[in-house]
């Protein structure tokens, strides 16, 4: 079985926000690696691709068996994607945050 993975507008905005944050941080560093923002975005997309095959392997959030979080490693920390399994064909990612952020935006 394969799931279709969709992003809400808010999750797509989160990806842009996270990309911009990494890029801005690198621009301020001496010896900046401007490709790190692209690699971070690629890591997030690769992580979310795993939801097509096995969304039920991710950790549950609260009491619903369908609301879950995907941990996406990157560098010394990583990202967390909040998603919901809608039915046996669809998964919707509603938010993405950096692991060091307090909560989803």
Image (cartoon, rainbow, N blue to C red):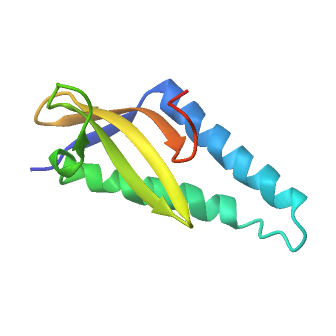
Q: Which of 7 and 70 is in front in this view?
A: 70
Residue placed at 51% from the left, 47% from the top?
99
Q: Where is residue 98 in the image (x, y as percent from the top left)?
A: 55, 46
Question: Could you say which quadrant of the image residue 14 lies in?
Answer: top right
- Write the residue at 52% across / 26% down: 10
Q: Is residue 66 left or right of residue 84?
A: left
Q: Is residue 33 left or right of residue 81?
A: right
Residue at (50, 25) in percent of width and height:
9
Query: Quadrant of the rendered structure where residue 59 is?
Result: top left
Return the x and y of residue 64 as percentages of the image width and height.
17, 25
Quadrant in which residue 68 is drawn: top left
Please, is residue 36 above or below residue 81 in the view?
below
Q: Give the number of marks.
A: 0
Q: Residue at x 20, y 44 (%)?
A: 3
Which one is nearer the viewer's eye here, 83 or 42? 83
With respect to residue 85, does 98 lie above or below?
below
Name the residue nearer the viewer: 90 or 94.
94
- Left or right for 49, reference 36: left
Relative to residue 33, is residue 65 drawn left or right? left
Residue 22 location (% of width, % of height): 71, 53
Q: Position of residue 38 (x, y in %)?
A: 64, 60
Check the picture and name the quadrant holding the C terminus.
Answer: top right
């Amino acid at each position: 079985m394969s799931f279709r993975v969709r992003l809400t507008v808010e999750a797509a905005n989160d990806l842009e926000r996270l990309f911009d944050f990494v890029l801005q941080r690198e621009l301020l560093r001496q010896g900046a690696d401007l490709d790190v923002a692209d690699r971070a975005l690629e890591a997030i997309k690769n992580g979310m691709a795993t939801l097509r095959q096995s969304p039920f392997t991710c950790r549950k959030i609260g009491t619903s068996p369908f609301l879950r979080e995907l941990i996406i490693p990157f560098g010394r920390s990583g990202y967390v994607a909040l998603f919901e399994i809608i039915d046996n064909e669809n998964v919707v990612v509603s938010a993405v945050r950096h692991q060091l952020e307090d909560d989803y935006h």
